[in-house]
Image: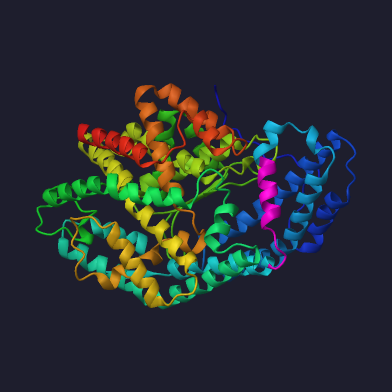
């Protein structure tokens, strides 16, 4: 099957072509129209659903652009004000209408005439939204939406000085690749000390978010925010016990491989003790991997890499570049991290990241590129609600792209040894990320099961969980001061709670996709595209099945997949 990146903006039939959201009074009539409209046939219900979807896409895209612009420049108060205005003045007024429209849909006598298979997951989400909606939560959710963005403002302002020059923490990361161990340690400590300066500020922000989220859950009739959030995230196909089993499987089947990786690293560097500032370093005489200089070069090389993998993939990045839907380089005042933001009306998404010329920037770029492909492939789906796919498949899209693209990384590395090192680096990361995923997930279970706790209790629990998943190689002595607040570097805790185990589940799916790819590239890419094209129109296990995978993250499955990755690493 052939796919096209010639994406078309959704044609408006309900809202005026030139309409843009400025205030609630201009938007409200469209919601009232939908709520008051009589529906007297299956055809009219279909038209009503399409009009509602169009309104959703316009509102969604407006909100996305406000967030994109603000994260690109956290120091611009006008952009912050525009985002906050949407969160405090627009979204809270939409929510009661959204709930009323959901109820109107489910009460329609023509609902039974809709194709049950086609609308199953869509209607399941509608019912979930009705179950969770509480009027009392509207102001809480608005406050949380604004507060969450403070994390990016606080961390985006963090810089350190090295040799008289100022660097963002992302840019400073390149010094951790230096052959000079003293420089590595110096920069590592400077980064950690800078984080410590805002420790109290981030602690207080997290305290406030926990209180508000817990209130939200209690209002909706849940014992804790974890249980509420699982339902909100649409975790219909696994539960907290599955997460606990995942944590234990990581200890059993992944940590031994992590120990092997770090032992090899220690031997390669020839150091008595492997320290936290040694992990990105290369042995003397081996230059650090430097795959690109500028954001423009990163983009051009990524386009070429994607084209070599499949022309459609390269075309998607080219289209985004034409639309100026990319902001790739790290700079002061820019929020941390990286993301792909789907744009519901435009179709072509936006990629945001903080590139600084390092190997992990290549991984981030192809990862977000995988998300972008997902946005392109699902854009043609009839309703906006059909595109609300589970994160567990969204992260397969991105993580599988990291592995698929490896065979085409010669665009970044023209030297065979460098290419081999880059692949090893990637596969090591596939394994070493699992303990951190388990740590962050387990920490969140504790946080929201114990919403009332002191900072000291939180720190003690964090240190205890870190110790559970600790490798046997790295020397962490003398670093307790830095490790005690290391959870604060994970933006998901602040901005998207409980969205993290998806990376672990999806990493397993991605390895499964890569196993297919090694046997039959064409078949694997076809399965990949077919699954992503379905958006959220099928249940999660069915999406995995379409991709040629089993939705299975049991200890037995983890063991098999880890052995496969180890075999591939040993072959390199």
Pick the front one: 561 or 378: 561
Query: In the image, what residue occupies the spot 56% across and 68% down?
Result: 214
Q: Position of residue 503 (x, y in %)?
A: 43, 47
Pick the front one: 572 or 103: 103
Looking at the rendered structure, the number of numbered marks drawn on it comes to 0
On the rendered structure, is 245 left or right of 394? left
Q: Position of residue 540 (x, y in %)?
A: 54, 38
Pick the front one: 248 or 289: 248
Q: Quadrant of the N terminus?
A: top right
Query: In the image, what residue occupies the spot 85% across and 37% down?
Result: 44
Q: Quadrant of residue 309?
A: top left
124 is within the stretch colored magenta: yes
On the rendered structure, is 283 left or right of 30? left
Q: Is residue 551 above or below residue 326?
A: above
Q: Quadrant of the C terminus?
A: top left
Q: How is the image coloured?
A: rainbow
Q: Quadrant of residue 273?
A: bottom left
Q: Position of residue 390 (x, y in %)?
A: 55, 44
Give the residues drawn in magenta, as a range.
122-136
On the rendered structure, is 59 left or right of 271? right
Question: Magenta part mainly helix, strand or loop?
Answer: helix
Q: Is residue 37 above or below residue 570?
A: below
Query: In the image, what residue occupies the spot 77% across and 63% down?
Result: 24
Q: Is residue 163 visible?
A: no
Q: Position of residue 25 (x, y in %)?
A: 81, 63
Query: In the image, what residue occupies the spot 82% across and 39% down?
Result: 45
Q: Is residue 188 visible?
A: yes
513 is within the stretch colored magenta: no
Q: Is residue 467 above or below residue 429?
A: below
Pick the front one: 329 or 83: 83
């Amino acid at each position: 099957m052939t796919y096209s990146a010639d994406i078309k903006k959704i044609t408006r039939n309900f809202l005026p072509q030139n309409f843009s959201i400025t205030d609630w009074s201009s938007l409200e009539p469209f919601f009232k129209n939908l709520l008051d409209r009589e529906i007297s046939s299956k055809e009219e219900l279909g038209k009503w659903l399409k009009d509602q979807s169009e309104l959703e896409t316009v509102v969604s895209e407006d909100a996305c652009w406000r967030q994109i612009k603000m994260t690109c420049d956290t120091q611009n108060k006008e952009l912050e004000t525009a985002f906050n205005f949407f969160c405090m003045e627009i979204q809270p007024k939409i929510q009661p209408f959204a709930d009323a429209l959901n109820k109107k849909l489910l009460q329609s006598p023509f609902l039974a005439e809709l194709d049950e298979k086609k609308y199953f997951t869509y209607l399941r989400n509608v019912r979930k939204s009705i179950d969770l909606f509480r009027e009392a939560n509207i102001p809480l959710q608005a406050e949380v939406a604004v507060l969450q963005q403070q994390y990016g403002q606080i961390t985006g302002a963090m810089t350190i000085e090295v040799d008289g020059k100022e660097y963002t923490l992302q840019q400073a990361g390149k010094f951790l690749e230096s052959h000079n161990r003293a420089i590595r340690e110096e920069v590592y400590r400077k980064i950690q000390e800078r984080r410590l300066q805002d420790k109290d500020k981030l602690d207080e922000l997290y305290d406030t978010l926990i209180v508000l989220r817990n209130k939200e859950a209690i209002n909706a009739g849940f014992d804790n925010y974890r249980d509420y959030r699982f339902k909100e995230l649409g975790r219909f196909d696994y539960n907290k016990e599955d997460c606990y089993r995942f944590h234990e499987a990581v200890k059993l089947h992944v940590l031994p491989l992590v120990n092997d990786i770090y032992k090899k690293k220690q031997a390669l560097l020839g150091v008595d003790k492997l320290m936290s500032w040694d992990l990105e370093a290369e042995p003397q005489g081996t230059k650090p991997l430097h795959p690109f200089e500028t954001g423009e070069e990163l983009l051009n090389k990524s386009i070429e890499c994607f084209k070599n993998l499949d022309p459609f993939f390269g075309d998607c990045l080219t289209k985004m570049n034409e639309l100026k839907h990319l902001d790739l380089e790290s700079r002061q005042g820019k929020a941390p991290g990286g993301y792909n933001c789907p744009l519901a009306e435009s179709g072509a998404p936006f990629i945001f990241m903080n590139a600084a010329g390092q190997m992990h920037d290549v991984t981030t770029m192809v990862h977000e590129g995988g998300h972008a492909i997902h946005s392109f492939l699902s854009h043609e789906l009839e309703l906006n609600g059909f595109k609300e796919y589970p994160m567990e498949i969204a992260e397969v899209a991105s993580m599988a792209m990291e592995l698929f693209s490896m065979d085409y990384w010669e665009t970044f590395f023209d030297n065979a040894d460098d290419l081999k090192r880059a692949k090893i680096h990637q596969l090591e990361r596939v394994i070493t990320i699992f303990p951190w995923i388990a740590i962050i997930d387990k920490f969140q279970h504790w946080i929201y099961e114990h919403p009332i706790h002191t900072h000291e209790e939180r720190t003690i629990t964090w240190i205890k969980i870190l110790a559970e998943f600790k490798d046997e190689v790295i020397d962490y002595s003398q670093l307790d001061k830095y490790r005690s607040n290391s959870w604060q570097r994970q933006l998901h805790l602040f901005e998207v709670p409980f969205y993290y185990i998806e990376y672990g589940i999806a990493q397993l799916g991605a390895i499964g996709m890569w196993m297919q790819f090694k046997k039959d590239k064409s078949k694997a890419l076809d399965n990949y595209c077919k699954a992503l094209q379905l958006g959220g129109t099928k249940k999660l296990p069915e999406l995995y099945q379409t991709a040629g995978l089993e939705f299975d993250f049991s200890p037995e499955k983890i063991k098999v997949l880890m052995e496969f990755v180890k075999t591939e690493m040993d072959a390199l």
